[in-house]
Image (cartoon, rainbow, N blue to C red):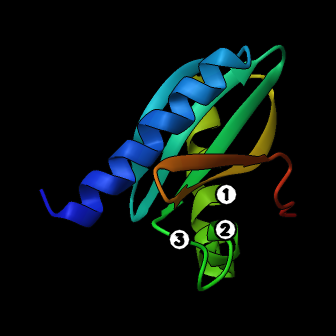
């Protein structure tokens, strides 16, 4: 596995740990629908959180969450709609971004809830 892929997986693992510590149940990881991938699907109370994880080795080029563009949002929404329909779920769906940024020897985690809305 390429080094950047390993670093991305580490970011997702850290995001999962963070979510579990904050009361979320992890439902799915790396769920695919057509060309879309949802990094993490988690549940807390009556909310289904569709989570995009962005991992960066530094923030020199901006915060990781700034790299979730309109095309990615459309793909996430399409995949989330399919997931909810496929599983026949009745939850409020929320789209979150978790950014993991490595600074020196530590990784900083930021959880942006309701990161975007799509109608």
The residue indicated by pointer 3 is 58
Percent across and percent down for residue 13 are: 43, 35
Percent across and percent down for residue 82 are: 57, 45
* Mark 2 burial class by Cα count in 10 Å: few <14, some 14-19, many 20+: some
- Looking at the rendered image, the quarter that the C terminus falls into is bottom right
Q: Relative to residue 8, is residue 85 depicted above or below? A: above
Percent across and percent down for residue 108 are: 62, 49
Mark 3–mark 1 distance (CA, rounded to whole Å): 28 Å
Along the horizontal axis of the image, is 7 left or right of 71? left
Percent across and percent down for residue 64 are: 62, 68
Residue 57 seen by the camera: yes
Residue 89 seen by the camera: no
At a point 66% along the width and 42% down the height, the residue shown is 50
- Nearer the N terminus, badge 3 or badge 2? 3
Mark 3–mark 2 distance (CA, rounded to whole Å): 23 Å
Q: Relative to residue 23, is residue 71 depicted above or below? A: below
At a point 68% along the width and 66% down the height, the residue shown is 65
* Mark 1 burial class by Cα count in 10 Å: few <14, some 14-19, many 20+: some
* Label 2: element kind: helix
Circles 2 and 1, Cβ within 8 Å, touching? The answer is: yes
The residue indicated by pointer 2 is 73
Closer mark to the observer between disc 3 and disc 2: 3
* Mark 3 burial class by Cα count in 10 Å: few <14, some 14-19, many 20+: some
Task: Determine which quarter of the picture holds residue 94.
Answer: top right
Along the horizontal axis of the image, is 116 left or right of 23? right
Mark 2–mark 1 distance (CA, rounded to whole Å): 6 Å
* Depth order, front residue of 34/56: 56
The residue indicated by pointer 1 is 77
At a point 45% along the width and 47% down the height, the residue shown is 11
- Nearer the N terminus, badge 3 or badge 1? 3
- Looking at the rendered image, the quarter that the N terminus falls into is bottom left
């Amino acid at each position: 596995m390429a080094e950047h892929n390993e670093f991305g997986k580490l970011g997702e693992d850290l995001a999962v740990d963070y979510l579990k510590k904050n009361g979320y149940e992890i439902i799915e990881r790396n769920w695919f629908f057509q060309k879309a991938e949802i990094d993490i699907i988690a549940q807390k109370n009556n909310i289904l959180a569709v989570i995009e994880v962005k991992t960066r080795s530094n923030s020199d080029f901006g915060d990781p969450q700034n790299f979730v563009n309109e095309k990615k949002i459309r793909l996430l929404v399409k995949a989330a709609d399919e997931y909810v329909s496929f599983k026949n779920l009745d939850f409020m769906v929320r789209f979150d971004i978790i950014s993991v940024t490595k600074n020196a020897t530590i990784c900083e985690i930021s959880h942006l809830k309701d990161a975007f809305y799509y109608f």
